[in-house]
Amino acid sequence: MSRPMASSEVARTDSLSDTQLREFLGYRLKRAYMVVHRAASNVLQQFELGTRSFTVLSLVAANPGASLSQLADLLLIERSNMVLILDDLETRELVKRSRDPNDRRRYLLKPTLQGLRVLEGATAAAFEEDKRLARALNDEEFALLMSLLRRVEEGASAD
Amino acid sequence: MSRPMASSEVARTDSLSDTQLREFLGYRLKRAYMVVHRAASNVLQQFELGTRSFTVLSLVAANPGASLSQLADLLLIERSNMVLILDDLETRELVKRSRDPNDRRRYLLKPTLQGLRVLEGATAAAFEEDKRLARALNDEEFALLMSLLRRVEEGASAD
DNA sequence: TATTGTTATACTCTATAACTATA
DNA sequence: TATAGTTATAGAGTATAACAATA
């Protein structure tokens, strides 16, 4: 496959070293996130959902009557970005906005029947893929990883 | 702070539930990655480096003579995107491209003296911030998390 | 034919500022 | 005056296709 290279002034190997970067939590987190995110995106594509749309649809279904700001806060994203996600979900009739009669600034968000149907299929597919992605770990290790990630998130956010 | 709300047809709590999503490795990975990435970006800003530029500069310094394609492969990004990162680093005279005399398709990448100086400071700051972000974990837990992340990445990439 | 680097482009995700209508 | 939702826009990050030079 690879033939011997004519040697040049600088010694080179076929595979580069990233041993220094591998000491960084940020580096390892990003690499793991990338492969997991890409795989999840591929699976959700058949439902015409991105990972963000899937997450928002899931939260709306689990919290009917939630507001846009609440969702944005929970997902650590800007309200202005949440508007676009909800625009998309509402255009496709997966989520419905309706004015909150008690506070006319707010919209109460609810899933449509079709939204619930799509979510059901997407959740099953996403969950199966999630398990497949973590197949290198046994149940105990998986639970441990989840707990460590949560502690990192909470410890890092607490400034 | 929060006054009692007039009750509406749908019961609502101030904090939404994401218990279903919290079962997903992808969800937890993304949340942890977001807070870590934002903090790292903030720290690297004083060196006018993004996390990607920092990573590439670090790899060039650790592997003088590496090629663009090798770096792209290692970082799991497209060659076309690596071109733009290197354009930026070279414009700022942190990295230098020079033709490989043995294969005139390639460029050998090397850090400049200024590149090494900037990298030294950036690495120290990034490492300190990385440790701060992981301060919720002791050394043993940190090592365990790193190992679990690596196994997820490798297991997930192996299709 | 295949590979390296490149250009152009589009799409996704994130961030900021300013506006409106309500409170 | 503060908050909820919105608009517009800019900046990262990522992906795809096509091309020239070289192997």
Image (cartoon, coloured by chain):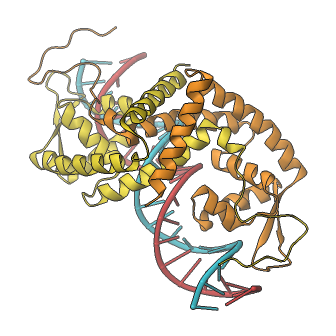
Chain colours: A yellow, B orange, C cyan, D red
Question: Which one is nearer the viewer's eye here, A142 or A71?
Answer: A142
Q: Can residue A141 be spotted in the picture?
A: yes
Residue at (86% x, 73% y) in the render: A7
Q: Where does the C terminus of chain B fall, quadrant-wise?
A: bottom left
Question: Which one is nearer the viewer's eye here, B53 or B75?
Answer: B75
Is residue A52 shown above or below A143? below
Q: Is residue A102 left or right of residue B122?
A: left
Question: Which one is nearer the viewer's eye here, B91 or B86?
Answer: B86
Q: Is residue A142 left or right of residue A11?
A: left
Q: Is residue B100 left or right of residue B140?
A: right
Q: Quadrant of residue B127?
A: top right
Residue B22 image point, x, y percent: 33, 33
Residue at (32% x, 42% y) in the render: A83
Is residue A40 shown above or below B25? below
Residue at (33% x, 46% y) in the render: A131
Q: Can residue A78 be spotted in the picture?
A: no
Residue A84 image point, x, y percent: 34, 47
Q: Where does the N terminus of chain B fall, quadrant-wise?
A: top left
Count numbered badges in the picture: 0
Residue A87 image point, x, y percent: 27, 48
Residue at (57% x, 64% y) in the render: B78
Residue B136 image point, x, y percent: 55, 20
